[in-house]
């Protein structure tokens, strides 16, 4: 079995991007998905993905293919990367591990041997130790590792090629070596500038941080929690400046970020954080901290501060609307971040503000591309008026 063969179980939004980056770097990649039509579109190279660079990488690929057959993928490689969804569960566990658990059980039912199974989707700390390893208990000489990506929807390919660091929670040293070799290979073939993949050049591999799976599970959530805390702090200072005569929030935060200990990234006033990852991961870390007997003061305060900031913005906009006797309020771009190329509106603070205003009788117009508007209509119906850009 060649080290150049890699199987990916789950080739949705993230999995297909990982697979195409690996293929671009010289690997033979076999992806598994449960939807036959989706698999056919990948193999026929007719997939129309809103994720930047996916369509061109797929068209140029020669060694990336998809299947619905899990057994074929298991036989194809000793390295099995798992990227199934672990969506918000709304419960105490914060993540729905159901699909992930089913994949691990299916692998275990086949009693595979000499494999490296790697979870790339976000899980609650302790999952691999307490659940994952048990679900693979009948697999001889098979390791389970944790290797989450730090990416953002709408920028996954660039996030894969340009990470600040790579996190490996290795089940065994051999598994860690295998993953480190894989990433070193990827980063010998990555772009130095955006554009056509055929023009991409070589740059240096980012730092690789290897540790235990439990450490990696905490690290993943800690990074996102720290970023959300920084965003919440910036918005709090911005709100303070807005109610302080003569103060300018941009001047203040630019100066604060000039301190090398702080930095300017994520330190700009604006909308609160949203999306499928930041709010969930922040709350999940807080829940895990509390479960372990420690007061989760920072994650809880960050979550509350984010909500208060959005309310502050909404109140300010509404009061200005009344004062100036405006007829309507326009939301430019419905996504959870700017720019947002993919139809993800989960916890979009812009839409929270729009809903607040609409419920107070203000005519709210959402202005965006059709695929974004379709997502908003599905969630909010006729609460808003819509204009396609």
Image: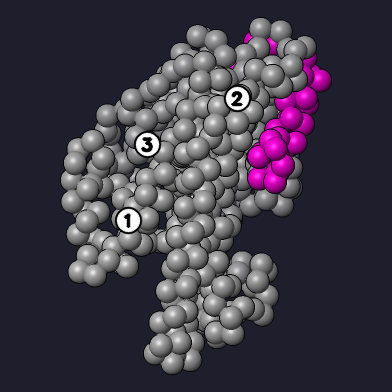
Indicate the position of residue 352 as horizontal and vertical percent values. Answer: 55, 66
Residue drawn at 77 percent across, 12 percent down: 138
Residue 384: in magenta span: no
Q: Position of residue 5 (x, y in %)?
A: 55, 24
Tell me, yes or no, whether the two marked residues, 3 and 2, touch with CB atoms within 8 Å: no
Q: How many marks?
A: 3
**Mark nearer the N terminus (1 vs 2):** 1
Horizontal and vertical percent position of residue 187:
35, 30
| Relative to 372, residue 387 above or below | below
Residue 293 is labelled as 2
How far apart marks 1 and 3 lie (CA) works out to: 29 Å
Residue 358 shows in the view: yes
Which numbered disc, 1 or 3, marks the residue that appears first in the sequence? 3
Q: Earlier in the sequence, mark 3 or mark 2?
A: 3
User: Residue at 52% across / 51% down in the picture?
Assistant: 304
Depth order, front residue of 256/293:
293
How many C-alpha atoms fall within 10 Å of the one at disc 2: few (<14), some, or many (≥20)? few
Viewer-closest of 316 and 285: 316
- In this figure, which residue is indicated by the disc labeled 3? 163
- Residue 208 in the figure: left or right of residue 254: right
Dot 1 falls on a residue whose secondary structure is helix
Distance, label 3 to label 2, CA atoms, is 33 Å
**Residue drawn at (19%, 59%), measured in percent from left and top?**
251
Does residue 190 lie above or below 215 as drawn?
Answer: below
Of labels 1 and 3, the one closer to you: 1
Range of the magenta residues? 88-116
Marks 1/2 in contact by CB < 8 Å: the verdict is no
Out of 187 and 150, give the one closest to the viewer: 150
Regarding mark 3 in the picture, which secondary structure is present there?
A: loop
Q: Mark 1 points at which residue?
A: 237
Say whether residue 102 is magenta. Answer: yes
């Amino acid at each position: 079995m060649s080290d150049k063969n890699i199987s990916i179980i789950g080739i949705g939004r993230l999995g297909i991007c990982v697979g195409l980056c690996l293929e671009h770097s010289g690997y033979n990649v076999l992806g598994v998905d449960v939807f036959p039509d989706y698999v056919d579109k990948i193999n026929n190279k007719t997939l129309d993905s809103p994720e930047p660079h996916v369509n061109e990488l797929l068209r140029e690929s020669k060694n990336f293919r998809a299947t619905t057959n899990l057994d074929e993928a298991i036989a194809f490689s000793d390295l099995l990367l798992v990227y199934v969804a672990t969506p918000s569960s709304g419960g105490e566990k914060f993540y729905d591990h159901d699909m992930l658990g089913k994949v691990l059980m299916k692998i275990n039912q086949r009693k595979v041997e000499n494999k490296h199974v790697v979870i790339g989707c976000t899980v609650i700390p302790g999952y691999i130790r307490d659940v994952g390893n048990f679900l693979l208990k009948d697999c001889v000489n098979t390791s389970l590792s944790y290797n989450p990506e730090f990416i953002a929807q709408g920028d996954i390919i660039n996030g894969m090629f340009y990470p600040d660091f790579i996190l490996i929670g290795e089940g065994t040293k051999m598994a860690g070596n295998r993953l480190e070799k894989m990433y070193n290979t990827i980063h010998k073939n990555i772009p130095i500038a955006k554009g056509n993949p055929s023009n991409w050049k070589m740059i240096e591999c980012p730092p690789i941080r290897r540790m235990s799976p439990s450490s990696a599970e905490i690290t993943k959530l800690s990074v996102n929690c720290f970023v959300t805390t920084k965003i919440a702090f910036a918005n709090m200072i911005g709100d303070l400046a807005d109610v302080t005569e003569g103060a300018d929030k941009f001047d203040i935060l630019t100066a604060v970020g000039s301190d090398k200990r702080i930095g300017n990234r994520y330190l700009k006033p604006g909308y609160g954080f949203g999306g499928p990852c930041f709010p969930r991961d922040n709350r999940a870390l807080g829940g895990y901290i509390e479960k372990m007997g420690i007061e989760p003061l920072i994650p809880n305060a960050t979550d509350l501060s984010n909500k208060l900031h959005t309310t502050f913005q909404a109140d300010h906009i509404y009061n200005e609307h009344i004062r100036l006797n405006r007829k309507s309020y326009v939301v430019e771009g419905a996504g959870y971040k700017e720019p947002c190329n993919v139809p993800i509106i989960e916890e979009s603070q812009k839409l929270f503000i729009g809903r607040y205003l609409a419920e107070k009788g203000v005519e709210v117009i959402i202005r965006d591309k059709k695929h974004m508007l379709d997502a908003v209509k599905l969630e909010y119906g006729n609460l808003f008026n819509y204009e396609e850009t």
